[in-house]
Image: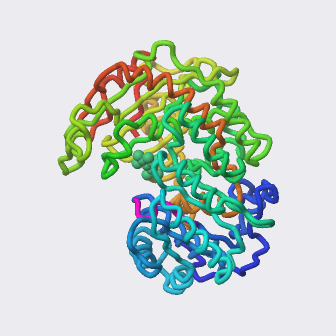
């Protein structure tokens, strides 16, 4: 929970953000321990949210804005504008926001924070094809500049389906909203998925870049805002003991898992036809893989970090035999704990012959000296045994074991597991002698847990990312090149799957289709049971 809920920053904070070029890499407190105690506070600005009545805005964006304010990280001169079709005035929007903030905020609800924040809230009613509504938006933004002191700095968050990006971008351009005045900035935040393949991603990029400068475009991959994902950089590059063994001499393979116990919920319209691989492998899991496999960056400035991630993404090789090294599944009815849940094809809004996968697993190799011969297995699925995301680096067996064969029967492979969520932390698995007179070695776990080691709760990923946009701090946002390279990896797999008919069904509450187990068994491994 926040420790400074009542702190109200000065409007002209010394740490307020400027243009990206004004930001030094060491402004990022997470990435440089020297700066850890210095809070980074956004400068005068507003956030305009398109799609403000959607699930993401309700559960993540609005609460994140409130939590930032409550932690004292937003300036007094901050404004929030919702754009949507509802017949609301500012007050109705503020009530809607309050209801969701109260339901989903992570810091305690504080009346005085809320009062101040809600005074800067505005609602603009309209549809994306309504130019008049965008003129109204432009007038509202100017009004905030005058009465709230937002000083012409405005960020536009596109929490809308990708097909709406082009029209919103065009309207922002035509109403003059995308152009900043001297000394001010305009930025656009784009939710994933960025396209549905390489061609559409490039087209989208063309449209957006006609309206915004490249360094004003922030593509969100919220996994990069997660504390544990950033901890991967600390683990690898702040310590001595991991890096020497982080290569093909010692590592046998890497398993990156993002498992969810929930189904598609009310997102049929988005999910059907997209599927698990486009939804999360193209972005979250490939980003995790890039951070796991990359070389040490020269610094944690955006261009240096991107340079290393880009090298990994460029060096990724697909298996020749996609049938043997990929797996797809679709959840069928089953039990999730004590609850009986419907299968994917019976979910509301899903066509009964849909071939969309809700589970995907793929093997990728990285053609570099460090990783030659080390497969990376990426898997994700909905309605699996439990919600867990982790990166497991699994080591080779010791070349010689000076024990009786029976003594090491229970000894598995050593592993370093970065627990992304829940129960964020790191586990090290190794063999230890069991107590007693006999020499027997068995696997044990040694745990670091964020919850136990730190009193401060980790901020929600969206808090971190929204703050970074307001500060113009880009290291945690994938670049166009990274997005394109990721589609290049996924496109051939999607094309192969599109000719394969129905994905293999798996019962809800299990760990996915048998095909995925066979895929790993072929290489002599098995999936970890997180
Ligand atoms: C989103 C996906 O990017 O991540 C969703 O579109 C998924 O399908 C969600 O449920 C999971 O996020 P988290 O942070 O709960 O792991």
- Left or right? Give the position of 147 relative to 127: right
Residue 50 among those drawn in magenta = yes
Looking at the rendered structure, the number of numbered marks drawn on it comes to: 0
| Colour scheme employed for the rendering of this structure | rainbow
Q: x%, y% of residue 515?
A: 33, 23
Residue 472 in magenta stretch: no
Residue drawn at (37%, 38%), measured in percent from left and top? Answer: 381
Give how far across and how far down residue 117 sits, in percent.
55, 79
Residue 206, given in percent of the width and then of the height, sits at 63, 40
Residue extending furthest top?
320
Horizontal and vertical percent position of residue 473: 71, 56
Identify the residue at image location x=44%, y=36%. Answer: 434
Q: Which residues are magenta?
A: 48-54
Residue at 52% in and 72% down: 66
| Residue appearing at x 60%, y 35% in the figure | 202
Q: Is residue 234 left or right of residue 220?
A: right
Choose between 298 and 456: the one closer to the eye.
298
Quarter of the image containing the C terminus?
Answer: top left
364 left or right, relative to 475:
left
């Amino acid at each position: 929970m926040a420790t400074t809920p009542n702190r109200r920053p000065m409007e002209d904070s010394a740490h307020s953000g400027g243009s990206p070029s004004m930001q030094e890499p060491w402004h990022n407190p997470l990435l440089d321990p020297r700066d850890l105690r210095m809070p980074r506070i956004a400068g005068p600005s507003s956030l305009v949210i398109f799609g403000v009545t959607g699930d993401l805005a309700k559960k993540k964006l609005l609460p994140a804005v409130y939590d930032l304010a409550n932690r004292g990280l937003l300036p007094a001169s901050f404004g929030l504008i919702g754009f949507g079709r509802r017949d609301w005035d500012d007050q109705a929007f503020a009530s809607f926001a309050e209801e969701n903030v109260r339901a989903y905020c992570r810091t305690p609800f504080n009346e005085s924070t809320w009062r101040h924040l809600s005074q800067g809230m505005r609602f603009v009613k309209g549809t994306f094809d309504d130019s008049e509504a965008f003129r109204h938006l432009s007038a509202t933004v100017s009004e905030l500049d005058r009465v709230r002191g937002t000083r012409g700095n405005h960020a536009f968050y596109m929490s809308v389906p990708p097909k709406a990006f082009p029209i919103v971008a065009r309207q922002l351009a035509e109403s003059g909203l995308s152009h900043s005045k001297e000394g001010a900035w305009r930025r656009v935040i784009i939710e994933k998925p960025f396209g549905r393949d390489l061609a559409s991603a490039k087209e989208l990029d063309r449209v957006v870049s006609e309206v915004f400068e490249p360094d004003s475009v922030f593509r969100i991959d919220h996994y990069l805002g997660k504390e544990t994902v950033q901890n991967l950089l600390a683990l690898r590059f702040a310590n001595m003991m991991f890096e020497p063994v982080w290569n093909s001499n010692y590592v046998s393979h890497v398993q990156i898992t993002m498992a969810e116990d929930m189904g598609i919920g009310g997102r049929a319209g988005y999910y059907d036809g997209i599927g698990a691989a486009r939804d999360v492998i193209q972005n979250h899991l490939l980003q995790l893989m890039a951070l796991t496999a990359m070389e040490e960056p020269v610094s944690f400035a955006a261009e240096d970090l991107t340079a290393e991630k880009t090298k990994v993404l460029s060096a990724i090789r697909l298996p020749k035999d996609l049938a043997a090294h990929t797996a797809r599944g679709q959840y069928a009815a089953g039990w999730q704990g004590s609850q009986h849940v419907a299968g994917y094809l019976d979910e509301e809004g899903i066509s009964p012959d849909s071939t969309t996968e809700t589970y995907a697993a793929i093997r990728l190799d990285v053609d570099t000296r460090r990783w030659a011969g080390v497969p990376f297995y990426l898997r994700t699925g909905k309605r699996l045994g439990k919600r867990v995301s982790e990166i497991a680096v699994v080591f080779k067996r010791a070349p010689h074991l000076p024990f009786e064969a029976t003594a090491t029967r229970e000894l598995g492979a050593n592993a370093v597991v970065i627990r992304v969520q829940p129960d964020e932390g790191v586990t090290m698995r190794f063999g230890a002698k069991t107590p007693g007179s006999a020499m027997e070695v068995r696997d044990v776990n040694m745990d670091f847990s964020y919850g136990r080691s730190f009193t401060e709760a980790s901020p929600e990923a969206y808090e971190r990312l929204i703050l970074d946009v307001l500060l113009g701090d880009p290291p945690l946002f994938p670049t166009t090149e990274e997005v394109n390279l990721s589609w290049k990896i996924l496109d051939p797999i999607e094309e192969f799957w599109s000719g394969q008919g129905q994905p293999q069904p798996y019962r809800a509450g299990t760990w996915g289709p048998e095909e995925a187990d066979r895929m790993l068994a072929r290489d002599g491994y098995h999936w970890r049971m997180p």
